[in-house]
Image (spheres, rainbow, N blue to C red):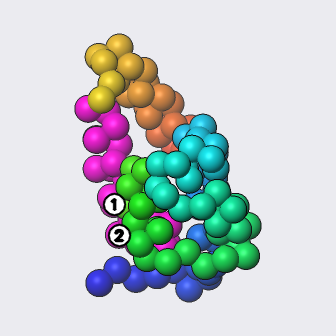
Amino acid sequence: MSSVEPEFGQDELARRLRTTREYLGLSQQYVSSATGIARSAISEIERGNRKVDSLELAKLARLYQHPVGYFLGSEVAKAESASAIGRILGDLNNEDREQVRKFAEFLSFSRRSERA
């Protein structure tokens, strides 16, 4: 069973859902059409004014191609990020995969520089 971060709550869940949707460049209307969740409900969920039920969260996670655990703040979700990246890379052409590799190296180098 995965552990949940102690500070995690409704506001953090709402933030993760909103920022993931925005990062993917999806409108609330598109998400509504793709999941069957009312656009007004998505808006309320993303503002933290409405709780998301487990079926809605599963639909959103599937659309956003993230494990449900990521949105719930579980430690396991961090390890699952690598498999999500692998799935995404499979859809890219060789040139795009090379760009992703270079960017990952850049990020890794930047993190090492910050710690030094």
Residue 46 seen by the camera: no
Q: Are marks 1 and 2 in contact (CB under 8 Å)?
A: yes
Residue 104 image point, x, y percent: 44, 34
Q: Which mark is residue 46?
A: none
Which residue is under mark 2? 76
Q: Is residue 84 above or below residue 17?
A: above
Q: Which mark is residue 79?
A: 1
In the rendered image, residue 79 lying in the magenta stretch gets the answer yes
> Residue drawn at (40%, 66%), measured in percent from left and top?
58
User: Element at badge 1?
Assistant: helix
- Residue 62, quarter of the rendered image: bottom left
> What residue type is disc 1 on?
Ala
Mark 2 neighbour class, 10 Å CA radius: few under 14, some 14 to 19, many 20 or more: some
Mark 1 neighbour class, 10 Å CA radius: few under 14, some 14 to 19, many 20 or more: few
Residue 13 image point, x, y percent: 59, 70
Which portion, as a residue range, is magenta? 70-90
* For residue 16, side relative to residue 79 (left or right): right
> Residue drawn at (55%, 75%), measured in percent from left and top?
52
